[in-house]
Amino acid sequence: MSLLPDHDRLLLGPGPSLTAPRVMRALAAPTVSHLDPIMLALLDDVRARLARVFRAPHGSFAFAVSGTGTAGMETVVANLVTDGTKVLVVVSGYFGDRLAQMCGRYGAAVTRLDVEWGRACDPEALRRALAAAGADIVAIVHAETSTGVLNPVKELAAIAREHGALVIVDAVTSLAGHPLEIDAWGIDAAYSCTQKCLGAPAGLAPVVFTPRALERRVPCRSFYFDLQLLENYWIRRAYHHTMSSTLVYAIDEALAMVEEEGLDARWARHERNHLAFVAGLAAIGLSVLPRAGERLWTLNAVRVPDGVSEADVRTLLLAEFGIEIGAGLGPLAGKIWRVGLMGSSSAPRLITVLLGALEQALAKQGWRAHG
Ligand SMILES: Cc1ncc(COP(=O)(O)O)c(C=O)c1O
């Protein structure tokens, strides 16, 4: 008996999103070794495509590290943070907290700028925090997946720059879903994942270091995430670890799809589908947690109505409709559902199916929108 799934799930949670059929076909290509000429050509292609998708300045090193988004986070932190580095971390949810913890593990003197969960960071709060404490590095989660809130990274990065700090950005839930401009916004290093807006399976983490970040790198304590060793592999072809060719096929195909759609058109698709979903929610009497102007297009934090069991609705959606949505984390556990509309999962037909299924799941619990 096989334990493999024989039908697909509608992946509408915080990630992974649906893998596009083209990317699925890429996954079936023959395995090659990590130093095969075919692989090396693919690595060059991935580097060039990622630099464009990150909109990184000339001279940046954009690549994909083996591992998930957290490996991307660790790569950036491990190569820029050392004992005593002063890092100011904007913590507006679960992943900001993870970033603060990661910096602490690499020896940073961390100052947290805590923001109420469900709100975006006010640029003036960052200005005050920097005036009070100063920082070598400001670290910001662009799209906080735990709350569905978008931080104003362009404004925050400009303030950090005024104070001479390097800017690190977590773009795990924003790359290829929301506008993100590494060069134009003055971001120095960023990381993301493959399993959300890029539409590939989990397993690689896109990372970019701009020339300014490359200059400020520190001796890296991690062997696996050492930028120097990773550059030696990606650029100078020296063995470092056995990178998965299968995952490289997937990311390359996913990036090709992003570039064929066009970044601007892809951002607009994510916005359009988010707005359609929020309008559909309103029509059945539901709303999202963040206020207008602070909402992610990629991840919708839907309020659970009073008297409704958050977990029962998710269980029913999965069992009866094969739809996955996510639960709330931390203080938002039991209070929100997290609905991801990312990559191939950002599509009108899926929104229609989800809204219908949600209405039925709520009706089963005796909940009616207007009465
Ligand atoms: C904003 C953010 N940062 C970091 C991560 C960690 O990524 P991963 O679970 O791929 O390691 C996630 C995961 O959802 C995330 O949403």
Image (cartoon, rainbow, N blue to C red):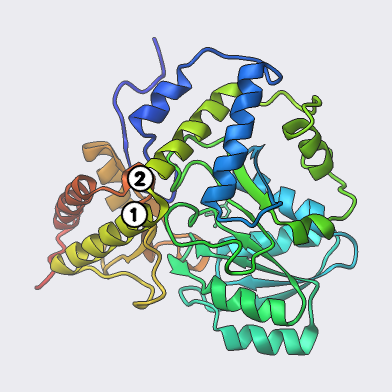
Q: In this view, does 180 lie to the left or right of 183?
A: left
Question: How far from the left and from the top, in percent, is residue 157?
Answer: 63, 74
* Quarter location, residue 2: top left
CA–CA distance between discs 1 and 2? 6 Å
Identify which amino acid the numbered label 2 is placed on.
Answer: Glu
Q: Which mark is residue 101?
A: none
Q: How many residues crowd around disc 1 within 10 Å: few (fewer than 14), some, or many (20 or more)?
A: some
Question: How far from the left and from the top, in percent, is residue 22?
Answer: 37, 28
Kindly identify the residue that appears in the image at 45 percent across and 23 percent down.
26
| Depth order, front residue of 156/7 | 156
Q: What element carries label 1?
A: helix
* Quarter location, residue 324: top left
Question: How far from the left and from the top, in percent, is residue 325?
Answer: 35, 49
Q: Is residue 203 above or below residue 38?
A: below
Q: In this view, does 173 lie to the left or right of 284?
A: right
Return the residue at label 1.
265
* Quarter location, residue 193: top right
Does residue 17 appear anywhere in the picture? no
Q: In this view, does 53 lie to the left or right of 261?
A: right
Does residue 303 appear anywhere in the picture? yes
Q: How many residues crowd around disc 2 within 10 Å: few (fewer than 14), some, or many (20 or more)?
A: few
Identify which amino acid the numbered label 1 is placed on.
Answer: Ala
Kindly identify the residue that appears in the image at 77 percent across and 37 percent down.
230
Return the residue at label 2.
261
Rendered-image quadrant of the C terminus = bottom left
Rendered-image quadrant of the N terminus = top left
| Depth order, front residue of 93/352 | 352
The reply to whether the C-beta atoms of the residues labelled 1 and 2 are less than 8 Å apart is yes
Q: In this view, does 282 lie above or below 52?
A: below
Q: What element carries label 2?
A: helix
